[in-house]
Amino acid sequence: MVEFLQFTLNGIVFGMIYAAIALSLVLIWRGTRLVNFAQGAMAMITTYIAIEVIYKTHSYWAGFVIALVAGLVLGAASELTVVRPTKGKPELNAVIVTIGLLIFFEGLAGMLFGGQFRSFPTGFSVTGLKVGGTALGISRFDVFTVVAVLLATLILAVVFRYTTAGLRMRAAALNATIARLSGIRVARVLTVGWALAGLLGALAGVLVSPSTFLYPNSMDAIFVFGFTAAVIGGLDSPVGAVVGGLLLGLALSYVGGYVGGSVGSEITSLVALGILVLVLMVRPNGLFASARMRRV
Amino acid sequence: MRTLPRRLGVAIVVAAIVVFLSIKLNAFRDYQIAEIAVYVTAVAGLTVLTGLSGQISLGNGAFMAIGAYATALLLLHLSWPFYLVLVISGAVAAVAGAVVGIAAARLRGPYLAGATLLLGVALPAIALAWPGTFGGDQGLNVVFTTPSFLGANFPLTRWQAWVSAAVALVTLLLLANLGHSRIGRNWRAVSDDEVAAALDGINVAAARVRAFVVSATCAGLAGSLLAIVTGLVAPGAYTITLSIALLTAAVIGGLGSLLGALWGSLIIVLVPTYITDVSTSHGLSSTVGANIPIAAYGVVLILVMLLFPQGIQGGLMRLISAFLGPDQKSRTGRIAPAPHVTPSADQAPASQHEKEGTS
């Protein structure tokens, strides 16, 4: 029973990280109709920036904030420099451009920071929490992880629902032409979407790196599971991204925990594939997809 | 059929060039020829899947792994002749392709991309989870030798280059014919407009599954070749990086033509080696030198996609038509017409993009 509780809490922590990546992918998908394969690599770069700042300033929070700002800038810059010119070209071109970005960022990180594994500090204690003598299997920092992602999600939801900027973004995602006719600068709105996605990715990078170490490919697996979470939830749906992330995090935690050993850790991706196939068999556009549109 | 003798002629000329090059060049270049042939085989299958049937796969490396492990296990336990092992490996991959194709028949766009991406990630994990059968991290060794009739001194790399190039050429010939058959026309119809294709009596799901089987077979053959060329089958060679390299090669080569598979394969094999040579000759430190090819490859991908929207083959066709005039273009373009473009509307893609660009 204690084991189950520990696996559940651990699953929620990782689930929130997958959810953050999934949300960033959903943000970009709604605006640009593109899966950004460089999302993980961008988060890896911003996390390297954070670690350099932390070394220089000896302040975790300085690194944390600068990582988020760097995420904003990197997201917007990527959209402006290489993604926008793919407009009007075949859809796959934009996908390959983001894959090119991914490869470029990983090569760049290798050049600038080297390939060795680096440990990443945490902002809070990582000793396990206990309730009445029972170890919960999670730390203060894990609690912070969950709270930070939830808070970011909540802020985004409020911005989208109650502010003019959010209304513009929703309008641009709904129908770009009509939004432009209503006086919305759609191109600028898309850039803002990419910037926000970059911020969310940077948050996920800083939060996950203490447990995965930091190296040029360290976000690859996180991206794959984040993408899987977004697909499970339905790429259009922010709620779906969070639910998909939690679902995946819990499932992988149970499998890793109960199967145990090296087999348990090796088959996590197979289990993720199983869940994805199962969900997509029943709902080909994810759990929370809006009514299906078919091009005729 | 005037096209069949012409294609056969082209294949024979290319085979002669490969034989000539493999004798003239050193063992490392022979290895590269074999490597390029391996990629051409796999990428051509993906060109058919994505270019003709309009489906994306980020997991074709998994089918290569299936072919490679089938080859390694068959050679290890049964030591059958390679040509038989090659055919069986292709067949095993075809079956896997059918399973994946059926599961994926309802998926579109990013959902298909996500499912195949996870397939590419998950499949090599099987080798790690059951090391008793698949050799775990270390993988399985593959023993492949030159046949006795070539003499004892015949270099192994040259023989590997010949075998790989032969398989690649035969695959290209078969795919070119398939693309122009009823099956290929059905793929184009499905890719252009599913509803219209279905109204025309085409079984859309079957056509899509068939495309997956064909591309998986090509990948399986390529995996089998890669097994004998590298002499080792280990999960590290069949990661998601390989699957992504295959898709990028297909797209930057040009999805409109099987020749695109050749250009794409040349780029993914030669560009990283070329840049490594340049950076080491300039005495760059090892961390920088080792990562420059990766970063530069990313830049090349982005630039090709922005400068040549139809891939390298599409760019070449534009150049050729600019030199020869428009009426020559339809002749040169007939090797394999671009998808979404009927032969009578050869000019359509350029004008269409101009229109979209200004909107």
Image (cartoon, coloured by chain):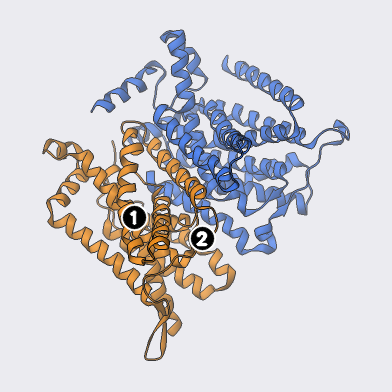
Classed neighbour count for the residue bearing mark 1: other residues with Cα under 10 Å, few (<14), some (14–19), many (≥20)? many
Q: Check the rendered structure and report the hue given to chain A.
A: orange
Please indicate whether residue B160 sits to the left or right of residue A115 in the image. Answer: right
Q: Name the residue rendered at 48%, 42% in the picture.
A: B209
Quadrant of residue B131 within the rendered picture: bottom right
Q: CA distance from mark 1 to mark 2?
A: 19 Å
> For the residue marked with disc 1, what is the amino acid?
Gly
Question: From the viewer's perspective, is residue B147 above or below residue A117?
Answer: above
Q: List the residue tagged with mark 2.
A: A270
The one of B7 and A21 positioned closer to us in this rendering: A21
Please indicate whether residue A94 sits to the left or right of residue B62 in the image. Answer: left
Name the secondary structure under disc 2.
helix
x and y, in percent, of residue A171 in the image: 17, 45
The one of A1 and B236 positioned closer to us in this rendering: B236
Q: List the residue tagged with mark 1.
A: A286
Chain displayed in blue: B
Q: Are marks 1 and 2 in contact (CB under 8 Å)?
A: no
Query: The N terminus of chain B is located in which quarter?
Result: top right
Question: From the viewer's perspective, is residue A86 above or below residue A43?
Answer: above
Classed neighbour count for the residue bearing mark 2: other residues with Cα under 10 Å, few (<14), some (14–19), many (≥20)? some
The one of B270 and B130 positioned closer to us in this rendering: B270
Q: Name the residue rendered at 46%, 61% in the picture.
A: A272
Tell me if residue A233 can be seen: no
The one of B343 and B240 positioned closer to us in this rendering: B240
Provide the chain ID for the residue under circle 1: A
> For the residue marked with disc 2, what is the amino acid?
Leu
